[in-house]
Image: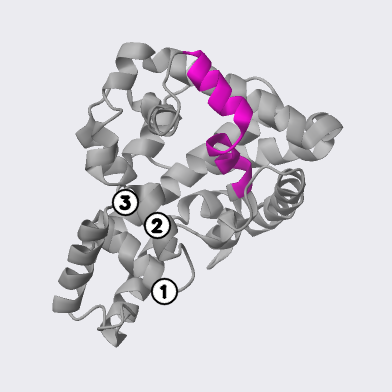
């Protein structure tokens, strides 16, 4: 099964992550009372954990500046309860997938992918995976396209929680994870990383200085040999921690799910679900 979980992430990430870009989702969340801007993202993704404080959100989202999180959490919960946020988020996803998939939203491919993805989630466990566990505690939707979205959400958060554990194990803080990811040349460019994750120029420079002192970055901001080794260890640990769903599903069903995922993911991307270059950025 080596590598299956990473290929699946590539195939299906677009079906989950549209919740962070689709205007229908943003409209549903602001319609529920949240303020435009960063609040719908932080509250929408964190709501499954309940009315948690900014410390919990920053810890589980990891590479965002905690100061940025604290500007909208916990205020979000005074504007809309977590239950209302979850309801609005799912409603927005329903509208977005219906638009992006068109008539295909009722197709056999969607139904089959939903069944397989839900089966894969039975191989996930909640220990040490707070964002996954929170979403796993939610009720399953009824419609196949929403079952598929919820399943891909569970699988994505399961993988993400394991990725954070790998970063912690290898001594990379949130900003250091982002800095080293940028330095690989396979993710965000510097300006996009600072803007989307909320880090100032001064914080970015201080993070680089710390990594240079540790021998992970060189004077030009590129990974040293040891820096490359650390990132490689993170990736190996992430993949190892993500195998549960695919071991449970088995090679044949995983391959079929990957095939379906690539087709459905291509549909939503071609329908304009994302700005150009989003899926070149990856996960820090």
Labels 1 & 3 near each other (Cβ < 8 A): no
Indicate the quadrant containing the N terminus: top left, top right, bottom left or bottom right.
bottom right
Q: Which residue is mark 3?
A: 63
Q: Residue 135 at x, y = what percent?
A: 43, 30
Q: Is residue 43 above or below residue 118?
A: above
Does residue 204 appear in this view? yes
Q: Is residue 188 above or below residue 140?
A: below
Q: Earlier in the sequence, mark 2 or mark 1?
A: 1
Looking at this view, is 107 or 276 the one in front?
Answer: 276
Labels 2 & 1 near each other (Cβ < 8 A): no
The crowd level at tag 3 (other Cα within 10 Å; few <14, some 14-19, many 20+) is many
Give the residue furthest to the bottom: 225
Q: Which residue is mark 1?
A: 184
Indicate which label's residue lies in the foreground, 3 or 2. 2
Cα–Cα gap, marks 2 and 1: 13 Å
Position of 160 with respect to 206 (left or right) is right
Labels 3 & 2 near each other (Cβ < 8 A): no
Instruction: Say which residue appears at 33% left-offset and 43% top-offset.
Output: 61
Name the magenta segment's main secondary structure: helix
User: In the structure shown, which secondary structural element does the residue marked by tag 2 occupy?
Assistant: helix
Query: Magenta part of the protein: which range?
Result: 14-32
Cα–Cα gap, marks 3 and 2: 10 Å
Answer whether residue 103 is magenta in the image.
no
Q: Quadrant of residue 172?
A: bottom left
């Amino acid at each position: 099964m080596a590598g299956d979980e990473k290929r699946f992430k590539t195939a299906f990430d677009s079906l989950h992550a549209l919740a962070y870009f689709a205007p229908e989702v943003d409209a549903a969340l602001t319609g529920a009372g949240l303020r435009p801007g960063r609040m719908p993202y932080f509250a929408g993704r964190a709501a499954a954990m309940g009315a948690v404080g900014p410390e919990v959100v920053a810890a589980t989202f990891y590479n965002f500046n905690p100061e940025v999180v604290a500007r909208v959490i916990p205020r979000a919960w005074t504007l809309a309860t977590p239950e209302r946020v979850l309801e609005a988020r799912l409603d927005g996803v329903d509208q977005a997938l219906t638009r992006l998939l068109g008539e295909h939203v009722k197709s056999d491919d969607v139904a089959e992918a939903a069944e397989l993805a839900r089966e894969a989630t039975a191989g996930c466990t909640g220990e040490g995976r707070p964002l996954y566990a929170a979403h796993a505690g939610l009720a399953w939707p009824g419609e196949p396209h929403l079952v598929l979205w919820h399943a891909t959400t569970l699988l994505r958060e399961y993988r993400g929680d394991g990725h954070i554990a790998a970063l912690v194990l290898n001594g990379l803080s949130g900003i250091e994870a982002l800095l080293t990811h940028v330095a690989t040349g396979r993710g965000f460019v510097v300006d996009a990383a600072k803007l989307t994750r909320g880090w100032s120029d001064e914080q970015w420079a201080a993070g680089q200085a710390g990594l240079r002192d540790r021998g992970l970055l060189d004077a030009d901001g590129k990974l040293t040999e040891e820096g490359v080794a650390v990132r490689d260890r993170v990736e190996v640990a992430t993949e190892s921690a993500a195998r549960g769903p695919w071991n449970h599903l088995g090679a044949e069903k995983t391959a079929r799910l990957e095939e379906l995922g690539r087709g459905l993911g291509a549909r939503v991307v071609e329908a304009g679900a994302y700005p150009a270059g989003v899926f070149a950025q990856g996960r820090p």
